[in-house]
Image (spheres, rainbow, N blue to C red):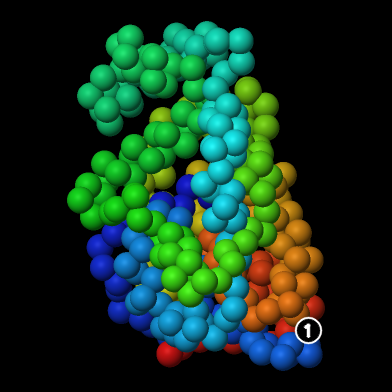
Amino acid sequence: MKKIALIIIGGALSLGAHAQLLWKISGDSLAKPSYVVGTMHMANASFAEQIPGVKTAINNTDQMYGEVSWDALHNPDTINYVKSTQMLPNNQTIKQILTPVQMKKLNAVSKKYQGTDFNNPKLMEQMGHMTPNALNDAFVLLMYLSENMGRVDPLHPIDSYFMTQAIANHEYFGGLETVKQQTDVLKKSTGATQKRAVQLLMCLLNNENFYIANQEDMDRAYYSQDLKALEKAMDEKLNNSCDPTAEENAVLIYNRNAAWLKKIPVLMRQKPTLFVVGAGHLVGEKGLLEGLRKLGYTVEAVKE
């Protein structure tokens, strides 16, 4: 599966027969149903209300759980921890990590998307001490914003819609994992070693067209609310060492799904819950939907 799952915002597409982002979970002695909704983390908040049944799911549940909790996202210690993981140790710079050829490519892509390169002291101050993993994330975002100028509001992503609704309803918005757990996962999925992290950064810089086209495929699938098409887009490959390894996929998706499937039943028995997770966690044999069915729950797409 691809680690890059960004959105081109262009309005909702026509919903087909497979349209399904919101699912109802019932049975197995649950007093009331719970729900799970798939998001794309950079989709605009306004898109949430175009998902059929989303208001019903919000009104018929008593708590929400996302990948991480609202409190954690706004905790200064957590924010500082995340920032610390994005910096190279011992005041190193990216120029010490990359070869001259790699640095030349980084500078060329930086100039394309930022109008300047790492020969600029100001940019070196801002980004020159970032890890290859963090630079990978930064350039994914820069490419995304360049492709979608004026069509996306990065300050109000779709996940924030659900957090806002929980606050308005005086409901708890908890997390299925801690920010530290998620940060460590995302770091490993873009290179558990520095060598692999550099390799994946160069894969991104050297294959812009592939990643942008892949993002468009995932955007189209998500806004069509078609999980089958989304799964297909997520499985698109370059068929070389740039593709994520089985271990990287397990770290990013499958191991987390397995951990969440231990927590979700407990939370549903406590209170009817709306789970808000990335849509990529719903799909496939190892996805949350199939996992919940294997645990004995009835899982049905909500159409209205």
Question: Which quarter of the figure has residue 283?
Answer: bottom right
Estimate the x, y position of residue 73 in percent, counting from the top left: 54, 48
- Residue 162 visible in the current orientation: no
Residue 185 in the image: above or below residue 265: above
Identify the image quadrant of residue 97. Answer: top right
Q: Residue at x 57, y 81 (%)?
A: 61
Does the image show residue 62?
yes
Query: Would residue 295 be found to the left or right of residue 194 on screen?
Result: right
| Image point (61%, 10%), residue name | 90
Quadrant into which the C terminus falls: bottom left
Instruction: State the image coordinates of residue 296 (x, y, percent, origin top left).
Output: 78, 84
Residue sitting nearer the eye, 109 or 53:
53
Could you say which is closer to the camera, residue 164 or residue 185? 164
**Label 1's element?**
loop
Reply above or below: 170 against 67.
below
Which residue occupies the extreme front position in the image?
170
Choose between 161 and 51: the one closer to the eye.
161
Q: Residues within 10 Å of mark 1 (few under 14, many from 20)?
A: few
Pointer 1: what residue?
296
Residue 267 coordinates in the image, percent (x, y): 72, 72
Which residue is at a point 22% across and 47% down the rendered structure image? 149
Q: Amino acid at mark 1?
A: Gly
